[in-house]
Amino acid sequence: MAYVGVLPEFGLVVDPLVGLVTTAGISYQPVIDKVTELDGIADDLVNMLSGSGNFLASFPGREESLKYAGGVSAFWYGLAVGLFIAGLIALQMVFL
């Protein structure tokens, strides 16, 4: 029985009688390893929203660093926007 090649670079073939996609004797292990690595990275991205936890690319003992970094960033952005609005109000008062 002949198989139809679906993705030859990954070794995927389909059996036309059954309609099942399978491998042609090539291991999926490199693909599974890459998916596992990407799964860990995606979990880190989602967990960054909470601001707590230990991440793949972080050093030990820096579990609370995202909370502090977010607070400092919010402070400086708030200060910049507040000063900009205060400057606009001051300019409006000067020219009226």
Image (cartoon, grey):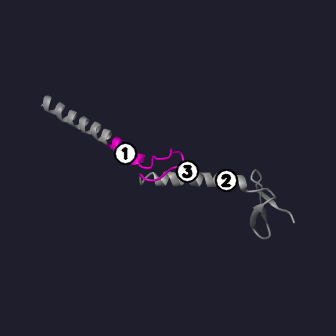
- Spatial CA distance of label 1 from label 2 is 34 Å
Q: Based on the displayed image, in which of its 4 quarters is residue 27 positioned? A: bottom right
Q: Residue furthest right?
A: 1
Q: From this viewpoint, is residue 56 visible?
A: yes
Report the residue at 49% width, 51% height from top. Answer: 54
Q: Residue furthest top?
A: 95
Residue identified by numbered label 1: 68
Q: Position of residue 57 (x, y in %)?
A: 53, 45
The kind of residue tagged 1 is: Tyr
Q: Are marks 1 and 2 in contact (CB under 8 Å)?
A: no
Report the residue at 80% width, 70% height from top. Answer: 17
Report the residue at 29% width, 36% height from top. Answer: 80
Q: Is residue 29 above or below residue 82?
A: below
The kind of residue tagged 3 is: Ile
Quarter of the rendering occupied by the N terminus: bottom right
Q: Is residue 56 magenta?
A: yes
Residue identified by numbered label 2: 33
In front of the other: label 1 or label 3? 1
Q: Position of residue 73 (x, y in %)?
A: 35, 41
Provide the residue span drawn in magenta: 51-74
**Which of the two discs, 1 and 2, labels the residue nearer the N terminus?**
2
Crowding around mark 3 (Cα neighbors within 10 Å: few <14, some 14 to 19, many 20+) is: some
State left or right for residue 90 relative to residue 50. Answer: left
**Which of the two discs, 1 and 3, labels the residue nearer the N terminus?**
3
State left or right for residue 84 relative to residue 10. Answer: left
Residue identified by numbered label 3: 41
**Which of the two discs, 2 and 3, labels the residue nearer the N terminus?**
2
Report the residue at 17% width, 32% height from top. Answer: 90
Q: Position of residue 84 (x, y in %)?
A: 25, 35
Q: Is residue 73 above or below residue 55?
A: above
In front of the other: label 1 or label 2? 1
